[in-house]
Protein backbone atom coordinates (compact mmCIF):
# COMPACT_ATOMS: atom_id res chain seq x y z
CA UNK A 1 0.00 0.00 0.00
CA UNK A 2 1.54 3.31 -1.06
CA UNK A 3 1.80 6.38 1.14
CA UNK A 4 -1.13 8.20 -0.50
CA UNK A 5 -3.45 5.24 0.04
CA UNK A 6 -2.40 4.93 3.69
CA UNK A 7 -3.09 8.60 4.25
CA UNK A 8 -6.49 8.23 2.55
CA UNK A 9 -7.43 5.27 4.74
CA UNK A 10 -6.22 7.05 7.88
CA UNK A 11 -8.31 10.08 6.96
CA UNK A 12 -11.40 7.94 6.46
CA UNK A 13 -10.86 6.25 9.82
CA UNK A 14 -10.59 9.61 11.57
CA UNK A 15 -13.78 10.74 9.83
CA UNK A 16 -15.57 7.54 10.86
CA UNK A 17 -14.55 8.07 14.50
CA UNK A 18 -15.85 11.64 14.20
CA UNK A 19 -19.25 10.26 13.10
CA UNK A 20 -19.35 8.04 16.18
CA UNK A 21 -18.55 10.99 18.43
CA UNK A 22 -21.29 13.03 16.78
CA UNK A 23 -23.82 10.24 17.35
CA UNK A 24 -22.85 10.11 21.01
CA UNK A 25 -23.04 13.90 21.36
CA UNK A 26 -26.35 14.35 19.52
CA UNK A 27 -28.22 11.15 20.35
CA UNK A 28 -26.47 9.95 23.51
CA UNK A 29 -25.58 6.52 22.09
CA UNK A 30 -22.04 5.18 22.37
CA UNK A 31 -21.08 2.88 19.49
CA UNK A 32 -17.35 2.95 20.25
CA UNK A 33 -17.29 -0.71 21.33
CA UNK A 34 -19.34 -2.06 18.45
CA UNK A 35 -17.47 -3.96 15.77
CA UNK A 36 -16.23 -1.25 13.37
CA UNK A 37 -16.67 -3.33 10.22
CA UNK A 38 -20.36 -3.93 10.98
CA UNK A 39 -21.01 -0.27 11.71
CA UNK A 40 -19.14 0.92 8.65
CA UNK A 41 -21.28 -1.26 6.42
CA UNK A 42 -24.37 0.38 7.84
CA UNK A 43 -23.03 3.90 7.56
CA UNK A 44 -22.01 3.10 3.99
CA UNK A 45 -25.64 2.35 3.13
CA UNK A 46 -26.56 5.90 4.12
CA UNK A 47 -23.74 7.27 1.95
CA UNK A 48 -25.15 5.39 -1.02
CA UNK A 49 -28.67 6.67 -0.32
CA UNK A 50 -27.43 10.27 -0.48
CA UNK A 51 -24.87 9.67 -3.25
CA UNK A 52 -21.96 10.73 -1.05
CA UNK A 53 -18.36 9.72 -1.69
CA UNK A 54 -16.82 9.49 1.78
CA UNK A 55 -17.32 9.95 5.51
CA UNK A 56 -16.24 13.59 5.48
CA UNK A 57 -19.02 14.38 3.04
CA UNK A 58 -21.42 12.51 5.31
CA UNK A 59 -20.29 14.56 8.33
CA UNK A 60 -21.16 17.73 6.42
CA UNK A 61 -24.50 16.21 5.43
CA UNK A 62 -25.29 15.38 9.07
CA UNK A 63 -24.51 18.96 10.10
CA UNK A 64 -26.98 20.34 7.56
CA UNK A 65 -29.61 17.61 7.99
CA UNK A 66 -29.96 16.66 11.69
CA UNK A 67 -32.96 14.44 10.92
CA UNK A 68 -30.48 12.09 9.24
CA UNK A 69 -29.28 10.96 12.68
CA UNK A 70 -32.55 9.10 13.19
CA UNK A 71 -32.27 7.44 9.78
CA UNK A 72 -28.69 6.42 10.54
CA UNK A 73 -29.64 4.96 13.91
CA UNK A 74 -32.48 3.03 12.35
CA UNK A 75 -29.91 1.32 10.13
CA UNK A 76 -27.18 1.02 12.78
CA UNK A 77 -29.40 -0.61 15.41
CA UNK A 78 -30.38 -3.47 13.09
CA UNK A 79 -34.17 -3.22 13.44
CA UNK A 80 -35.08 -6.36 11.55
CA UNK A 81 -37.70 -8.63 13.07
CA UNK A 82 -40.96 -10.43 12.49
CA UNK A 83 -43.40 -12.55 14.46
CA UNK A 84 -42.32 -16.15 15.09
CA UNK A 85 -38.97 -15.63 13.32
CA UNK A 86 -37.21 -19.04 13.23
CA UNK A 87 -40.34 -21.13 13.73
CA UNK A 88 -38.46 -24.18 15.09
CA UNK A 89 -37.02 -22.10 17.92
CA UNK A 90 -40.47 -20.82 18.88
CA UNK A 91 -41.93 -24.31 18.76
CA UNK A 92 -39.31 -25.38 21.30
CA UNK A 93 -40.09 -22.35 23.46
CA UNK A 94 -43.79 -23.22 23.34
CA UNK A 95 -43.40 -26.94 24.08
CA UNK A 96 -40.43 -26.96 26.48
CA UNK A 97 -39.38 -23.57 27.86
CA UNK A 98 -42.75 -22.12 28.80
CA UNK A 99 -44.06 -25.34 30.45
CA UNK A 100 -40.79 -25.63 32.40
CA UNK A 101 -41.05 -22.05 33.65
CA UNK A 102 -44.64 -22.64 34.72
CA UNK A 103 -43.70 -25.89 36.51
CA UNK A 104 -40.86 -24.15 38.35
CA UNK A 105 -43.23 -21.39 39.49
CA UNK A 106 -45.94 -23.78 40.61
CA UNK A 107 -43.44 -25.91 42.52
CA UNK A 108 -42.40 -22.82 44.50
CA UNK A 109 -45.96 -21.51 44.75
CA UNK A 110 -44.95 -18.32 42.94
CA UNK A 111 -47.11 -16.51 40.42
CA UNK A 112 -44.92 -13.75 38.96
CA UNK A 113 -43.31 -14.50 35.57
CA UNK A 114 -40.92 -11.93 34.13
CA UNK A 115 -39.60 -12.14 30.57
CA UNK A 116 -37.19 -9.90 28.67
CA UNK A 117 -36.90 -9.36 24.92
CA UNK A 118 -33.58 -7.49 24.70
CA UNK A 119 -33.20 -5.62 21.43
CA UNK A 120 -36.92 -5.95 20.82
CA UNK A 121 -37.07 -3.65 17.79
CA UNK A 122 -40.75 -3.02 16.95
CA UNK A 123 -42.07 -5.50 19.47
CA UNK A 124 -42.71 -8.61 17.39
CA UNK A 125 -40.61 -10.83 19.66
CA UNK A 126 -42.24 -9.59 22.88
CA UNK A 127 -45.72 -10.03 21.45
CA UNK A 128 -44.81 -13.51 20.19
CA UNK A 129 -43.94 -14.44 23.78
CA UNK A 130 -47.26 -13.00 24.99
CA UNK A 131 -49.19 -15.03 22.41
CA UNK A 132 -47.43 -18.27 23.38
CA UNK A 133 -47.92 -17.79 27.12
CA UNK A 134 -51.60 -17.08 26.46
CA UNK A 135 -51.91 -20.30 24.47
CA UNK A 136 -50.01 -22.49 26.91
CA UNK A 137 -51.76 -21.18 30.03
CA UNK A 138 -55.22 -20.74 28.47
CA UNK A 139 -57.72 -20.04 31.27
CA UNK A 140 -54.96 -20.32 33.89
CA UNK A 141 -53.32 -17.14 32.62
CA UNK A 142 -55.21 -15.09 35.23
CA UNK A 143 -53.51 -17.11 37.95
CA UNK A 144 -50.16 -15.56 37.00
CA UNK A 145 -48.79 -12.04 36.90
CA UNK A 146 -46.95 -12.04 33.57
CA UNK A 147 -44.70 -9.13 32.64
CA UNK A 148 -42.95 -9.16 29.28
CA UNK A 149 -40.37 -6.40 28.88
CA UNK A 150 -39.28 -5.30 25.43
CA UNK A 151 -36.22 -3.05 25.45
CA UNK A 152 -34.30 -1.28 22.70
CA UNK A 153 -32.07 1.74 22.22
CA UNK A 154 -34.16 2.95 19.27
CA UNK A 155 -36.97 5.12 20.62
CA UNK A 156 -38.78 5.24 17.27
CA UNK A 157 -39.00 1.44 17.15
CA UNK A 158 -40.30 1.37 20.71
CA UNK A 159 -43.11 3.77 19.76
CA UNK A 160 -44.07 1.42 16.93
CA UNK A 161 -44.02 -1.48 19.40
CA UNK A 162 -46.34 0.36 21.78
CA UNK A 163 -48.79 1.08 18.96
CA UNK A 164 -48.80 -2.61 17.99
CA UNK A 165 -49.53 -2.03 14.29
CA UNK A 166 -47.92 -4.34 11.71
CA UNK A 167 -47.92 -4.81 7.96
CA UNK A 168 -48.66 -8.21 6.36
CA UNK A 169 -44.94 -9.00 5.89
CA UNK A 170 -44.36 -8.88 9.66
CA UNK A 171 -47.06 -11.47 10.36
CA UNK A 172 -46.30 -13.86 7.49
CA UNK A 173 -45.28 -16.65 9.90
CA UNK A 174 -48.53 -16.49 11.86
CA UNK A 175 -51.32 -18.94 11.11
CA UNK A 176 -54.73 -17.65 10.06
CA UNK A 177 -56.18 -18.96 13.32
CA UNK A 178 -53.68 -16.98 15.40
CA UNK A 179 -54.18 -13.87 13.30
CA UNK A 180 -57.91 -14.01 13.95
CA UNK A 181 -57.45 -14.62 17.68
CA UNK A 182 -54.76 -12.08 18.49
CA UNK A 183 -55.06 -9.33 15.87
CA UNK A 184 -57.59 -6.96 14.39
CA UNK A 185 -57.22 -6.22 10.66
CA UNK A 186 -58.31 -2.93 9.11
CA UNK A 187 -57.69 -3.97 5.51
CA UNK A 188 -54.10 -2.70 5.51
CA UNK A 189 -52.51 -3.36 8.90
CA UNK A 190 -52.79 -5.83 11.76
CA UNK A 191 -53.34 -4.43 15.27
CA UNK A 192 -52.38 -6.58 18.25
CA UNK A 193 -55.34 -7.10 20.58
CA UNK A 194 -55.49 -5.39 23.96
CA UNK A 195 -55.31 -8.56 26.06
CA UNK A 196 -51.91 -9.39 24.47
CA UNK A 197 -50.72 -5.80 24.60
CA UNK A 198 -51.53 -5.69 28.32
CA UNK A 199 -48.86 -8.32 29.03
CA UNK A 200 -46.06 -6.24 27.49
CA UNK A 201 -44.06 -3.24 28.67
CA UNK A 202 -41.68 -1.43 26.33
CA UNK A 203 -38.83 0.77 27.51
CA UNK A 204 -35.70 2.45 26.23
CA UNK A 205 -32.62 0.63 27.49
CA UNK A 206 -28.98 0.55 26.43
CA UNK A 207 -27.62 -2.97 26.95
CA UNK A 208 -24.11 -1.57 27.36
CA UNK A 209 -24.58 1.37 29.70
CA UNK A 210 -27.94 0.64 31.29
CA UNK A 211 -28.66 -1.45 34.36
CA UNK A 212 -30.11 -4.90 33.68
CA UNK A 213 -33.64 -5.84 34.63
CA UNK A 214 -34.06 -8.07 37.68
CA UNK A 215 -35.61 -11.43 38.58
CA UNK A 216 -36.10 -12.45 34.95
CA UNK A 217 -37.20 -15.99 34.09
CA UNK A 218 -36.40 -15.92 30.36
CA UNK A 219 -34.25 -13.56 28.28
CA UNK A 220 -34.30 -13.54 24.48
CA UNK A 221 -31.47 -11.62 22.82
CA UNK A 222 -30.94 -12.79 19.26
CA UNK A 223 -28.49 -11.45 16.71
CA UNK A 224 -27.57 -8.37 18.73
CA UNK A 225 -24.35 -9.38 20.46
CA UNK A 226 -22.64 -10.39 17.20
CA UNK A 227 -22.21 -6.67 16.51
CA UNK A 228 -20.30 -6.11 19.77
CA UNK A 229 -16.61 -6.58 20.46
CA UNK A 230 -15.64 -9.66 22.51
CA UNK A 231 -15.05 -7.51 25.59
CA UNK A 232 -18.46 -5.94 25.29
CA UNK A 233 -20.13 -9.30 24.66
CA UNK A 234 -18.76 -10.62 27.95
CA UNK A 235 -19.93 -7.49 29.77
CA UNK A 236 -23.48 -7.84 28.45
CA UNK A 237 -23.57 -11.58 29.12
CA UNK A 238 -22.60 -10.88 32.73
CA UNK A 239 -25.56 -8.50 32.95
CA UNK A 240 -27.87 -11.18 31.59
CA UNK A 241 -26.56 -13.68 34.13
CA UNK A 242 -27.19 -11.16 36.90
CA UNK A 243 -30.70 -10.44 35.61
CA UNK A 244 -31.80 -14.08 35.48
CA UNK A 245 -33.41 -16.02 38.29
CA UNK A 246 -31.71 -19.30 39.26
CA UNK A 247 -32.65 -21.85 36.56
CA UNK A 248 -33.71 -18.99 34.29
CA UNK A 249 -33.37 -19.34 30.52
CA UNK A 250 -31.44 -17.40 27.87
CA UNK A 251 -31.97 -17.67 24.12
CA UNK A 252 -29.36 -16.26 21.72
CA UNK A 253 -29.12 -16.11 17.94
CA UNK A 254 -28.10 -19.29 16.15
CA UNK A 255 -24.70 -17.86 15.18
CA UNK A 256 -23.88 -16.63 18.68
CA UNK A 257 -21.72 -18.51 21.17
CA UNK A 258 -19.50 -17.15 23.94
CA UNK A 259 -17.21 -19.97 25.04
CA UNK A 260 -15.82 -20.03 28.60
CA UNK A 261 -18.28 -17.51 30.02
CA UNK A 262 -21.26 -19.60 28.93
CA UNK A 263 -19.75 -22.79 30.30
CA UNK A 264 -19.14 -21.18 33.69
CA UNK A 265 -22.54 -19.54 34.14
CA UNK A 266 -24.93 -21.54 31.95
CA UNK A 267 -25.65 -25.08 30.84
CA UNK A 268 -26.95 -25.91 27.37
CA UNK A 269 -30.68 -26.65 27.23
CA UNK A 270 -30.97 -26.86 23.44
CA UNK A 271 -27.70 -26.39 21.57
CA UNK A 272 -29.34 -26.24 18.13
CA UNK A 273 -31.55 -23.32 19.13
CA UNK A 274 -28.88 -21.67 21.35
CA UNK A 275 -31.01 -21.91 24.47
CA UNK A 276 -29.24 -22.03 27.84
CA UNK A 277 -30.24 -22.39 31.47
CA UNK A 278 -28.55 -20.51 34.29
CA UNK A 279 -26.56 -22.77 36.61
Image (tube, grey):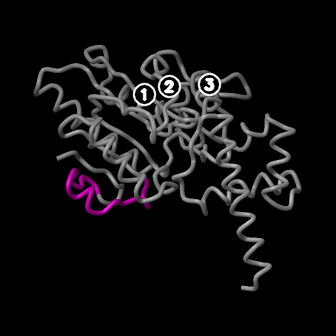
* 3 or 1: tag closer to the N-terminus: 1
Real-space Cα distance between discs 2 and 3?
A: 9 Å
Pick the quarter of the image with the N terminus.
bottom right
Q: Residues within 10 Å of mark 2 (few under 14, many from 20)?
A: some
Real-space Cα distance between discs 1 and 2?
A: 7 Å
Q: Looking at the image, which residue is at 12% across and 20% down?
A: 109
Q: Which mark is residue 159?
A: 3
Q: Which mark is residue 149?
A: 1
Q: Which mark is residue 203?
A: 2
Q: Residues within 10 Å of mark 3 (few under 14, many from 20)?
A: some
Label 1 close to label 2 by CB (< 8 Å): yes
Q: Position of residue 242 (x, y in %)?
A: 27, 38
Secondary structure type for disc 2: strand
Secondary structure type for disc 1: strand
Q: Is residue 153 left or right of residue 239?
A: right
Q: Position of residue 197 (x, y in %)?
A: 49, 20
* 2 or 3: tag closer to the N-terminus: 3
In the picture shown, does residue 163 fall above or below 268? Answer: above
Q: Looking at the image, which residue is at 39% across and 33% down?
A: 116
Q: Is residue 173 left or right of residue 264?
A: right
**Magenta stretch?**
253-270
Amino acid sequence: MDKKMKELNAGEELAFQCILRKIKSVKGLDFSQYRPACLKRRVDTRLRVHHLENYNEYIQFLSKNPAEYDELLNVATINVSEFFRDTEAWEFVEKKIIPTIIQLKEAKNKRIIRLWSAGSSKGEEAYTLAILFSEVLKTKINEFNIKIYGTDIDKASLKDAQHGLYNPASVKNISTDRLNRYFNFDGKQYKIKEEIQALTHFQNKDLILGEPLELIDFIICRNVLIYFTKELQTKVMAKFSSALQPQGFLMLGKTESFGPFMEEHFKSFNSAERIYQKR
